Image (cartoon, rainbow, N blue to C red):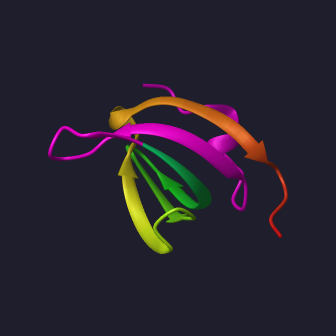
Amino acid sequence: MALVQWFNKVGCVVAIIYICKKGAVTKRRIRILAVREGHIRAFCIDSGAQRVFLTANILAAELVSRDAS
């Protein structure tokens, strides 16, 4: 899966639909912290914790905010 261009913008808030390791589909709002090949490190606004997401498990994504604030 090719990363959407704004995934490389640290600080952006993105809404994603994601499949977790157990196969459950979840919707999350994340603030991008870092992007590496195959992984996105982000702060999950919904759970209040830092998480690592596999890009291959992101089913859909939508930009919520470009602001880093």
Q: Which residue is most to the bottom?
A: 49
Does 23 lie within the magenta span?
yes
Does 18 lie within the magenta span?
yes
Q: Which residue is most to the left?
A: 22
What residue is at 26 percent from the left and 45 percent from the top?
20
- In the image, 30: left or right of 25? right
What residue is at 61 percent from the left and 31 percent from the top?
4
Percent x, y for residue 47? 46, 67
Total number of numbered discs in the rendering? 0
Percent x, y for residue 25? 32, 37
Percent x, y for residue 28? 50, 49
The magenta stretch is 1-26
- In the image, 5: left or right of 39? right
The answer to which quarter of the image holds residue 12 is bottom right
Percent x, y for residue 55? 40, 39
- In the image, 24: left or right of 36? left
Q: Quadrant of the N terminus?
A: top left
Residues 26 and 5: in front is: 26
What residue is at 58 percent from the left and 52 percent from the top?
29
The answer to which quarter of the image holds residue 6 is top right
Residues 33 and 50: in front is: 50
What residue is at 46 percent from the left and 74 percent from the top?
49
Q: Quadrant of the C terminus?
A: bottom right
